[in-house]
Amino acid sequence: MSLTDHSHLPYSYYRHGRFHAQIELYFPKTELKRLGISRNNLWITNAVKCRPVKESAGILVNRAPTVKEIKNWLGPLIEELEIIHPRIIVCLGAVAAKALINKNFALTKDRGFWFDGPFGSRIIATFHPAYILRQIGDNWDIAMEEFRADLKQALLPSPD
């Protein structure tokens, strides 16, 4: 069990956190290769750098971050993006999109479209891998197909 499971300490893709496991399920080497993406060309981060939890039936379970938590982590995220200075940002899920695109971002309506990002970057949003994990049957197929289409869109030259 990682430190983030109970301590609310910041985590990163490289060290611990559930995000790592979800990313590995949907960004395996074969999927990246299929899309022509090298893992060496990706920087994976989080809009909220800790795992928000709530107690339910005596155990800690995930919950969506609050608007205040997203706002509190925006400064460190922007600093990170200033250092990395990406050309393209792919927001995985509504939390990242609400942090970087618009606080009223609606994933089902706005995913797959380009937006202006910080430091001259372009941003596109798609489903979070955890959302895809929760889908069953045809819903999984549809979500995965849309996810892959959004990633392919991100590989194309972005409209200026």
Image: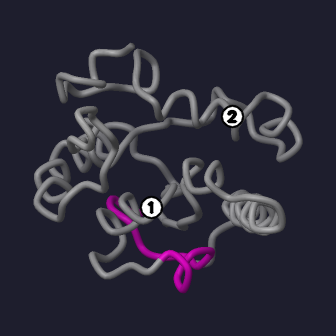
Quadrant in which residue 67 is drawn: bottom left
Among the two numbered marks 1 and 2 on one chain, the one whose residue lies closer to the N terminus: 2
| Location of residue 33 in the rendering, given as x and y in whole percent from the top left corner | 85, 36
Residue 119 within the magenta-colored segment of the rendering: yes
The numbered mark at residue 121 is 1
Under mark 2, the amino acid is Leu
* Residue 140 placement (x, y as % from top left): 76, 60
Q: Judge from the rendering whether residue 23 lies leftward or rightward of residue 92; answer left or right.
A: right
Looking at the rendering, the stretch of residues picked out in magenta corresponds to 107-120
Name the residue: 37% across, 42% down: 46
Q: Amino acid at mark 1?
A: Ser
Label 1: element kind: loop
Colour scheme shown: one colour
Give the residue drawn at x 33%, y 69%.
98
Above or below, comparing residue 119 to residue 16 in the picture: below
The span from disc 1 to disc 2 (Cα, nearest Å) is 27 Å
Q: Is residue 26 above or below residue 127?
A: above
The answer to whether residue 118 is left or right of residue 7 is: right
Task: Check if residue 43 falls in the magenta segment.
Answer: no
Foreground pick, 66 / 77: 66
**What number is the disc on residue 25?**
2
Disc assigned to residue 53: none
Q: Is 121 on the left-hand or right-hand side of 7? A: right
Question: Which residue sits at x=63%, y=34%?
Answer: 41
